[in-house]
Image (cartoon, grey):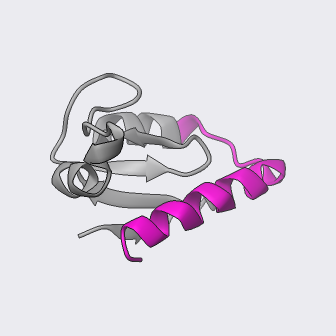
Amino acid sequence: MANIKDNKKGFKVIQVSRNELMDKLGQYGAMGICDRCNGTASTGYYIAVLNQWFCPHCYQEWYHRATYYPEDAKVENKNFEFYKNIFGL
């Protein structure tokens, strides 16, 4: 089941399984393929500021080098609220 992933940098992230992602968004073309490495994983992370789904490995690599910019909050919040509703969070 999808859940909100807390992090110290303040990014809005949803941890969601590949199966749930495909169940809820497959009709729109979501395949549960990492938007960074094109690999698959049973669980991944939807990163609202990027509007992308990453496998755990790519998420960790991204997170360690990512910087939060407050000016991105409007787009991040819009994306986050949209997917929160889809996943029933």
Q: Is residue 6 magenta?
A: no
Left or right, 21 with respect to 83, comes to left
Q: Magenta region: which residues?
A: 64-89
| Residue positioned 48% across, 58% down in the render | 13
Q: Quadrant of residue 80?
A: bottom right
| Residue positioned 16% across, 52% down in the render | 19
In x, y percent, where is residue 40? 20, 33
Tell me if I can see residue 16 in this picture.
yes
Task: Please determine whether, in this image, residue 82 is positioned above or below residue 22.
Answer: below
In x, y percent, where is residue 56? 30, 43
Left or right, 7 with respect to 73, comes to left
Tell me if I can see residue 5 in this picture.
no
Quarter of the image that includes the C terminus: bottom left
The residue nearer to you, when weighing 13 against 9, is 13
Left or right, 17 with respect to 88, comes to left
Task: Please determine whether, in this image, residue 16 is positioned above or below residue 88.
Answer: above
The residue nearer to you, when weighing 52 against 29, is 29
| Residue positioned 32% across, 36% down in the render | 29
In x, y percent, where is residue 7? 52, 63
